[in-house]
Amino acid sequence: MRGRGRNRRRGMAAAVLVCAAAAHAAGPPVPAAAAPGEYSPAALYNQGNAYARAGNTAMAVLYYERARVISPHDPDVRANLHQVRAAAGLPEEGPWLESHARFADPDVLYWLGLIGLALAAAGLLAVRFHPRRTLGRAALVAGVSLLSMAALDAAATWPLMHEAVVVHAATARVSPAGASAALFTVPAGQVVEISDDYGEFALVRTPSGQAGWVARSDLSSVI
Amino acid sequence: MRQPRIHDMDTLGARVYGFLSGLAASLFLAAAAAADPAVTAAIEPAEVSLGEAASLTITAADGNARINPPSVPGLQFTQVAQSRSLQSVNGVTSSSLSVTYQVTAQQAGTYVISSIAPGVGPLTFKVDAGGTGQGAQRGQGVQPAQPPAPDSSQAAPDGSAFVRVLLPRQEIYVGQSVPVDIEVGTQDGVVASINGVPTLDGDAFTLDKLAAEPEQRSHEVVDGKPFTVFRWHSVLSAVKPGRLTFAVQAPLTVRVRMQRPGGVFDRSGLADLFNDPGLANLFAATVNKDVNVSSPATTCMVLDLPAEGRPGDFTGAVGQFKVSSELSDSQVTAGDPLTLRMKVSGQGNFDRVRSPMLGDVDHWKVYPATSTFSPADHSNFRGDKTFEQPVVATDPGRQTLPGLTFSYFDPDQRRYETARTDPVTVDVSAPAAAAPARSAGSAPAPVPAAARDAGLRPDHAPQRSHGNSLVPHYFQPRYLALPSLLLLALPGAWFWLSRRERRAQEAGGAGAARTVAPEHLAAAMDRATAAGNVPEFFHAARAGLQTALARRWRLPPDAVTLEEVEARLGAQSEARKIFVLADEALYSGRPFARSELNDWKRVVLRQMGLEAAS
């Protein structure tokens, strides 16, 4: 009886892990919405290179930034992004969190976070209900670590959801109207944060803290 | 500046106008009374300035009649008095009912008060914005201005402002962009401000957003009065076919002169002397009133785009366009990127000017195109839209890029047109790595992109697709289902395990109670101490501890092992020492003094909570 009870507990903890692993092995669910195309870090990076060679700095920056979303620490992406920015006189890096707190492909970290969540849950149950709590504590620590890593990455990636690249040199205006007073000019290739929308205009904030309304057609979202 | 002669003429005109109006109203009322003497109605005065009130008196010959206030949009009727009078003529008594309403208008205009009672004709009530009522009769205001000359303009009821819509054509197609000029004229000194841009009134049309400030400003004289005319340029589009109307309205603030019902000196004997317009003007107050001035309804015939002859690549562009194309270089090395540009110039709805550019082309790698619009006017009606598509020649040789096409509907020709560009031929040389085999002793292969390439790291080998969205999984709602399921499963598993454990404890607790009776342990340990049987003593001590700890931890007694005790209570705990001593006593035969055993007995009893009982 005693051995059977222990086996049941171990089996339950293992089942949670197996479920998570099976979900990972099965791959992501099929997206319902029509997608514009397939993405890969190499394709995005190569497209950025193509634009850079064609002299289109803004589009090059856009595709390098997109490549960085999937592959944040690719040295080639970083080097070429640095190269085109330096050539165009654009500021270098985004916020510190975005640059340093991202570990890997966010989708990989999603699955790791999911496994971490399963481990943490199993560890919590083991610590409470299993007589040998060392294993449970280890699972709990490992799970919380993975979960924290994924959460940190998500927090660092979240600003990218609101970032855009200025694809044509644009005039930032005081209000969302084409005839309103101009505040400053945003150079092509500049990464800006979009904080609001109104019709065909977006309220953008530059890394230097300037804010103004820019036509949507002059912006392209990073994600 | 005031001009006395004109001013006097205005005053005289106003008086004549007021007299004639009163005469007409009296005649009308007399006729109405003759037609049906049961109910009569009169409004006094029939013409006021905005902000002033008039009195409407409705009298019924039957004192038991029921009188209800009329309902006129824009007018407010407040009952201020009600009287019933009795008359006795030749012994016949009759009664009549009279109700007086205060009438106030929310905005200037001419109102018709009808449906007062059966048989009572309509009353005309005029409200002026700038003091053409009593004030005008006293010579302070201006005469109502006639609408300005263009037919597509609309004046405010008092003529102090108008809105014009200048549309070049009355027949348009769905989706077609038509330039439109909107003019708002405001009489100087009467209109205080324009409170916003003109807006479209009509759900069948869209009007491009107007600039916050008008693009042009000019001055006109209308009926001898100076007007400032503000002009906006925009583009109008129809969203559905049919004979449709629209209007444009502008919010304004007008200055209204508040005139008290009676003059300052009306109740004194000096009224005739001091009711001079200048003096009255001195005592009049001016307030601002917000009003909306609308253009007259403009009717357009909106035609649907014909289905016949519609090209497959038609994207909804309507207008007149020209296309041209160019390639960034005519000689390249295989693998070098080029930019193919197509420029669409002309006038029309550029937001519908779209082109996918080239699809798959043999010997070329083609990337998605982007577009840029350069407007030539404020309304984005004319301009150039440039499509750029990066292309890379994959094979050396003379390669040709096919011509591009762009289809649109020409509203003047009333047919679809397809503009085409010529194919482009490029000489593609082999890449530098293959050059030695090809060009030994010949001219070196051109490297046109070398300068641009400087400092860039090379392309990466193709990889497995990452997916079809750049949005990370943890920001996609559908991917949040898995962690949510896990979080839901955790309390479920917790509950299930707790129940299972509780049942096991119930079963285990009963068994322990059957195997070890804690109250007999002290006696058993006493007997073992008296007999000097150390193994028996510690066996009893361990059994007692197991029972007590199993109850405390809700475990079966068998599960309370040395490891469990050490894990839960630590290596230095007394309970663990008893477990260790029990093993020692059993296997090593270590002797214990009676006092030591008594000490351990107290420890066991304390752990079991039986110390007091011992």
Image (spheres, rainbow, N blue to C red):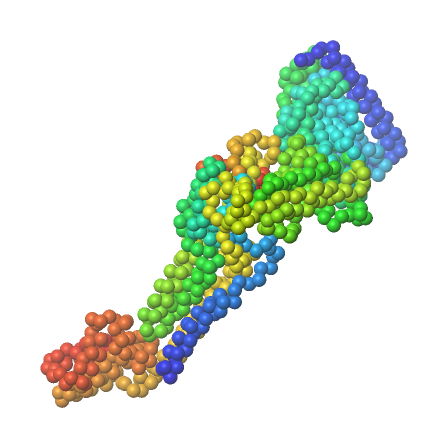
Q: Residue furthest top?
A: B5
Q: Residue furthest front?
A: B441
Determine the image quadrant of residue B546. Answer: bottom left
Q: Residue furthest right?
A: B35
Q: Is residue B108 above or below residue B473?
A: above
Residue at x 74% of width, y 37% of height: B320
Q: Residue furthest bottom?
A: B531
Answer yes or no: is residue B245 visible: yes
| Quarter of the image that includes the C terminus of chain B | bottom left
Q: Position of residue A188 (x, y in %)?
A: 53, 38
Q: Position of residue B289 (x, y in %)?
A: 65, 29
**Residue situated in front as seen by the camera: B228 or B541:** B228
**Residue situated in front as seen by the camera: B396 or B558:** B396
On screen, residue B315 versus residue B303, left or right, reads left
Residue at x 49% of width, y 67% of height: A25
**Residue situated in front as seen by the camera: B164 or B395:** B395
Answer yes or no: is residue B466 visible: no
| Quarter of the image that includes the N terminus of chain B | top right
Residue at x 82% of width, y 21% of height: B20
Q: Position of residue A96 (x, y in %)?
A: 40, 46
- Give the tally of numbered discs: 0
On screen, residue B227 versus residue A134, left or right, reads right
Q: Is residue B225 above or below residue B494?
A: above
**Residue situated in front as seen by the camera: B315 or B477:** B315
Determine the image quadrant of residue B135. Answer: top right
Residue at x 44% of width, y 61% of height: A113
Q: Position of residue A151 (x, y in %)?
A: 43, 56
Q: Is residue B139 above or below residue B334?
A: above
